[in-house]
């Protein structure tokens, strides 16, 4: 059988004209119509999937924005109650924190290079974006993962039903304010306001340690078992110090010095 491409009427395979509308039929008409239908169906499925992902993205963005507003109103009070339900929001915040720090360093070096006469198109030859951004981003992202793991490790002995998602959700919620401060430090270097950059950046880093300490205490206060909150916070800070010490001595500082030697 053939299918008329004009009215979709089925006719015999040897017909030259459509018996319904009179349209002349050529070889392969049925195949062409079938292929067209399949392509239209595939296009419709892709469009439907795209719309679905777009809607999910909108819902995720709206939910995260509501989460930010919620945390800014009272970070300490609301942060203590966050948990597994905000695991995705916590992940987003921790990734943004890891992202903003290397961007701050990159644009800071760019501004310094510009002030020294190395700006413009040739800047990438002296301070490549990949070497300044990607490695620090990976190391900082690894640090926040290790930080979450340390918090989980010190809180787990007192809470047998505690899961890692709850730790990330609560820690990420309390990291909203420090992440915003780090973003502010990025804007400061972009505007060449170096006189206040150090204060803002250090405040953002200090906020991270405060967020970790509060997270540990929030879990420790729910039970009398396990590691005491004071020692839990001490373990976290020692672990963070050792990690930064190793990374700064062997990776980041040496890399930055190598890049700056081009100047």
Image (cartoon, rainbow, N blue to C red):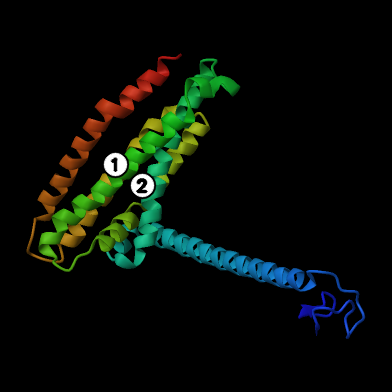
Residue placed under numbered mark 1 in the picture = 206
Residue placed under numbered mark 2 in the picture = 178
| Distance CA(mark 1)–CA(mark 2) | 8 Å
**How far across and how far down the image is residue 221, in percent?**
15, 63
For the residue carrying disc 1, how many other residues have a C-alpha within 10 Å: few (<14), some (14-19), or many (20+)? few
Q: Residue at x 28, y 49 (%)?
A: 145
Q: Is residue 166 visible?
A: yes
**How far across and how far down the image is residue 215, in percent?**
23, 56
- Quick one: which residue is furthest to the bottom in this view? 20
Above or below for 154 versus 111: below
The earlier-in-sequence mark between 1 and 2 is 2
Q: Residue at x 50, y 25 (%)?
A: 111
Above or below for 176 versus 127: below
In the shown orientation, is residue 110 left or right of residue 72? right
Q: Secondary structure at mark 2?
A: helix
**How far across and how far down the image is residue 78, in percent?**
32, 63
- Quick one: which residue is furthest to the left in this view? 225
In the shown orientation, is residue 29 left or right of residue 155? right
**How far across and how far down the image is residue 67, in percent?**
42, 62
Q: Residue at x 20, y 53 (%)?
A: 151
For the residue carrying disc 2, how many other residues have a C-alpha within 10 Å: few (<14), some (14-19), or many (20+)? many
Q: Secondary structure at mark 1?
A: helix
Above or below for 28 versus 176: below
- Image quarter where the N terminus lies is bottom right
User: Looking at this view, is 48 or 259 the one in front?
Assistant: 48
> Which of the 4 image quadrants contains residue 39?
bottom right
Q: Is residue 105 visible?
A: no
| Mark 1 touches mark 2? (CB < 8 Å) | yes
């Amino acid at each position: 059988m053939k299918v008329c491409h004009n009215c979709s009427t089925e006719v015999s395979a040897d017909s030259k004209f459509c018996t319904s509308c009179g349209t002349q039929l050529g070889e392969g008409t049925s195949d062409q119509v079938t292929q067209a239908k399949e392509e239209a169906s595939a296009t419709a499925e892709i469009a439907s999937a795209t719309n679905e992902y777009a809607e999910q993205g909108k819902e995720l963005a709206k939910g995260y924005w509501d989460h930010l507003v919620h945390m800014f109103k009272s970070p300490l009070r609301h942060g203590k109650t966050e948990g597994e339900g905000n695991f995705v929001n916590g992940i987003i915040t921790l990734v943004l924190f890891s992202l903003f720090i290397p961007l701050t360093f990159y644009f800071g070096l760019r501004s310094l290079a510009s002030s020294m006469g190395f700006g413009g198109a040739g800047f990438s030859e002296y301070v490549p974006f990949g070497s300044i951004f990607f490695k620090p981003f990976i190391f900082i992202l690894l640090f926040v993962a290790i930080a979450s793991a340390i918090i989980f490790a010190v809180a787990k002995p007192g809470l047998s039903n505690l899961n890692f998602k709850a730790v990330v959700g609560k820690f990420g919620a309390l990291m909203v304010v420090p992440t915003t401060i780090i973003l502010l430090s990025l804007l400061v270097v972009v505007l060449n306001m170096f006189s206040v950059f150090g204060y803002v950046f250090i405040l953002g880093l200090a906020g991270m340690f405060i967020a970790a300490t509060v997270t540990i205490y929030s879990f420790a206060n729910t039970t009398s078992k396990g590691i005491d909150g004071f020692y839990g916070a001490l373990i976290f800070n020692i672990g963070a110090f050792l990690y930064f010490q190793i990374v700064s001595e062997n990776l980041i500082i040496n890399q930055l010095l190598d890049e700056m030697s081009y100047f």
